Amino acid sequence: MTQLIDDLEAVRVHLNMERWLLHGVSWASTPGLVYALAHLDRVTEVVTLSVATGHR
């Protein structure tokens, strides 16, 4: 999961965005939420649908 979060941050930096809205559906909501918690100052909103936590 750490590599996914680092990749998301690299995309944000590459796009030269100070802050952004994250949108995740199903499993993609999990790294989006983890990213938001790790980078609170870089996320404006989080939109999730069909949230999957990765746990049974």
Image (cartoon, grey):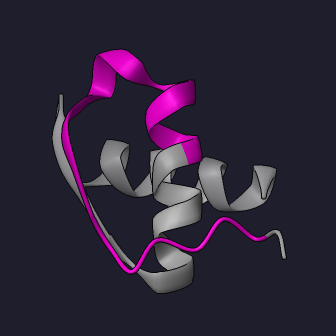
Q: How many marks?
A: 0
In the drawing, does residue 54 fall left or right of residue 53? right
**x and y percentages locating residue 21 in the rendered image:** 16, 49
| Rendered position, 46 above or below 30 | above
Is 49 part of what is drawn in magenta? yes
Q: Residue at x 32, y 48 (%)?
A: 12
**x and y percentages locating residue 35 in the rendered image:** 52, 42
Locate residue 43: give its quadrant.
top left
In the drawing, does residue 5 fall left or right of residue 42? right
Q: Quadrant of the N terminus?
A: bottom right
Single out the residue that lies furthest toward the top: 41
| Rendered position, 47 above or below 56 | above
Q: Residue at x 35, y 42 (%)?
A: 13
Q: Residue at x 66, y 62 (%)?
A: 4
Closer to the camera, 27 or 40? 27
| Rendered position, 56 above or below 44 | below
Q: Residue at x 66, y 65 (%)?
A: 53
Locate residue 48: give its quadrant.
bottom left
Closer to the camera, 10 or 56? 56
| Rendered position, 26 above or below 40 | below
Does residue 16 appear in this view? Answer: no
**x and y percentages locating residue 47 in the rendered image:** 21, 58
Locate residue 7: give its quadrant.
bottom right
Closer to the camera, 31 or 56? 56
**Magenta residue span:** 34-54
**x and y percentages locating residue 40 in the rendered image:** 39, 20
Q: Quadrant of the C terminus?
A: bottom right
In the drawing, does residue 17 fall left or right of residue 32? left
Is 50 part of what is drawn in magenta? yes
Single out the residue that lies furthest toward the front: 56
Does residue 11 appear in this view? Answer: yes
